[in-house]
Structures are given as structure tokens and as C-alpha cells.
Amino acid sequence: MRKDLMISGICALSLIMLTQNAYAQTYEKESASGKVRFQCELEVPENWNGEEIPQFILESVHFVDSEKAYANFIEGKEILEKHNTPASNLYPEENYYVLADGTNVGIGIEFGISTKNSTYYAQIGVTNAENMEKFTSATESVVNEQDAVQKVKETLENAGYTVENLVFQTSPLSADILREIEDQYVAEGLLEESKRKPEWTSGDDVCIVYARQTVSGIPVYPELSVMAQALAYDTPESSPVVAVCSTRGIESLRVYGLYNFQEDRENVPLKGFDEIAATVETKYENLLDEATYTVTRAKFYERAYINEDQQYTAEPIWYLEINDNNSQKYVMLVNAETGKEIYLM
């Protein structure tokens, strides 16, 4: 298949290369000054033409079904404590329960479950996907990944969520790896020796389950992700659904940032990626520093957010990861319809 060569209307380019089709795989570009480079794959939905997408109406946040969740996770159990936060204009009432068996359940803005064992996993950052790259073990987790996903789906449905538009990702971790992670946390002073888990056994093996929402095949970028650079990164642990499943079942589950969309009859025209790239290039070319910047990721999203009128709405965006030559990483968002930058708070 031939390579399509294009020239940007804003700046002289050393090279632009798109392979397979107009938006299929690789985008490589360097500005005339050499300060800004693109070396990334364009991550887009299947059968996407790059010219337009449907207009999506964000009707509401998909909150937990409070009555259903209470019936399935609280009713008939001994409650030691209950904490209540009243509803607001945007958010429902929040109730937090501490049960006699050591389980905590939150029902409201977020839906969350944590068992008495969850602390041991949380205190070593077990949901951090980088652990899969840093730690390896000859011992595999005994938790079946498909079974773990099914347990998460059933739990979500029991709380009133739909799972059809969720895309799941798994990360199994054996007790050997968990012990390694704990050792490192203690060695680095991130965890006190006295708070170690007494023993890690195969019964503590886990499978971490992450899930992101899609709308018509387009991944959804949650509202909280624009609050700060630290929250903006597209990593598994930033998914709106994160669960830790052991041989005992779900040890922890957190759900926030799912939405109810309606597809409008109108289509939204999209800027070509050259124009998106020009917006990025202009921003970093104008920085008065000696650094060079390389765009390493470009992913198409439908962004959910609260507008100036305090109403939920949605817009198509490009999510871009940029690395400088000092090993610093940044996230930049660009509106895919207007080509303008969306500023992180």
C-alpha cells in the first residue's frame, strides 16, 4: 500500500508519513526548527473515516442505582457505621457503610466496595499498571482473568450499571510479585515495616480488572481527567472502573465517570490531524526554552465534561502525550472539531 505524503499549511515539515490509510497507524513529523517532533500511532476507532462522527448528547452521569445496590450489598447485613452526605444540584446523596464483616460500601457519587483485606493491596499500589513491567515471577496468578471480569460485570449489574459498552483490561499478579512490590515499598520508605501483610500466599493472588466506557466504539474521556496533569494520563488505573479480584472474590471495586449518551441525527465535522498537529507545534515552538518535544501518543476520545452553564456535555478530542528531552511527560488535549487546545486546570 502506498504512503500518503502531506504538507502542513502552517509550518514547513521535514516529514509527514501516514501508513495504511489516512488515519490508520503511524504519524511522523518534525518542525523546521527541530523543536517539535511527532513519532506516534494515531489511536482511532475501527471503521473511522477521520472526517466526521455522530453528535453525542451527554444526558447524565450514570450513577449507581442506590436502591438496587443497597438491596444487593447492604440489606440483611450488620451495619456498624453509616455516614451520609446530602444530595446537591449535580450529585446524588452519598451513603457510606461500614459492615461488621470488615467490608466498606459507598453508594452515591461513586460506587465502591472494599474488604478487610483490601488495605494490603491498596497500600502497595497494586492497581498501578507499571507493576506488570517492573516485576516478573515464574509463578502465575491462580485467578482466572475471564472469571475475574465476569465477577466485576455481575457486581456492576447488581449495582444498576450496564456493561455492554465497557471495554475490559486485566493484569494478573501472583503472591510472589505482590511480595516483591511490598518489599520495594518498605525499602523505599513508602510503607512501614509494621504494616506489612503477615504472609502472602497463593490465596492472595489477584487479577486487576480495568474498564473504560465507549460510545459507538469511541473511548470516553471522563470529566475528572481534565482537573490536573496528574489525572490526565491515559493509564489503566485512570479507568472509571478499577477492581482487585483475588481467589476470595472482589477485594475492592471503584466506579466513577460513566455516562448516559444519546446519539443525535447531526454529525460533527472533524479537523484533519495536520491541523491538530499544527496546534501542538505552535504551542511548543512558542516556548522560550532550549528543550525539544516529541509527541509519542495521539488518541481519539469523546470527552465528557461540565460546561460553563454547569451542564454535562460532550465533545470529540485528541489526547496527546508529549515527552521533552529532560524526561518530563505532558498531556495536551485538542478539540477535534475546532482544532483548539483544551486547557487542563
Image: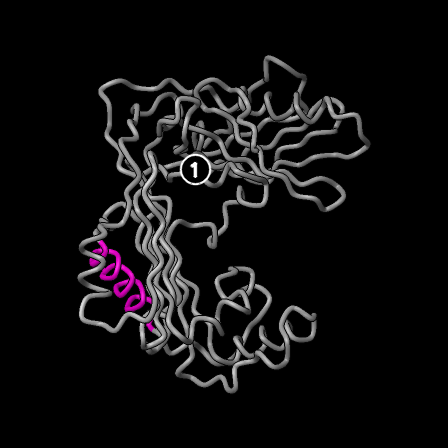
Furthest-top residue in view?
A: 9
Look at mark 1 in the image and give the residue it sits on.
223
Give x and y (percent) for residue 319: 51, 35
Give x and y (percent) for residue 1: 45, 32
Q: Residue at x 42, y 50 (%)?
A: 239
Give x and y (percent) for residue 221: 42, 38
Res 152 → quadrant: bottom left
Looking at the picture, which amino acid does disc 1 mark? Glu
Q: Residue at x 43, y 37 (%)?
A: 223
Q: Is residue 76 shown in magenta?
A: no
Q: Is residue 148 shown in magenta?
A: yes
Q: How is the image coloured?
A: one colour
Give x and y (percent) for residue 185: 63, 71
Q: Nearer the viewer, residue 238 or 323?
A: 238
Res 106 → quadrant: bottom left
- As helix, strand or loop, the secondary structure at mark 1 comes to helix
Res 31 → quadrant: top right
Q: Residue at x 45, y 30 (%)?
A: 23
Residue 118, above or below 232: below
Stretch in magenta: 144-159
- How many marks on residues? 1
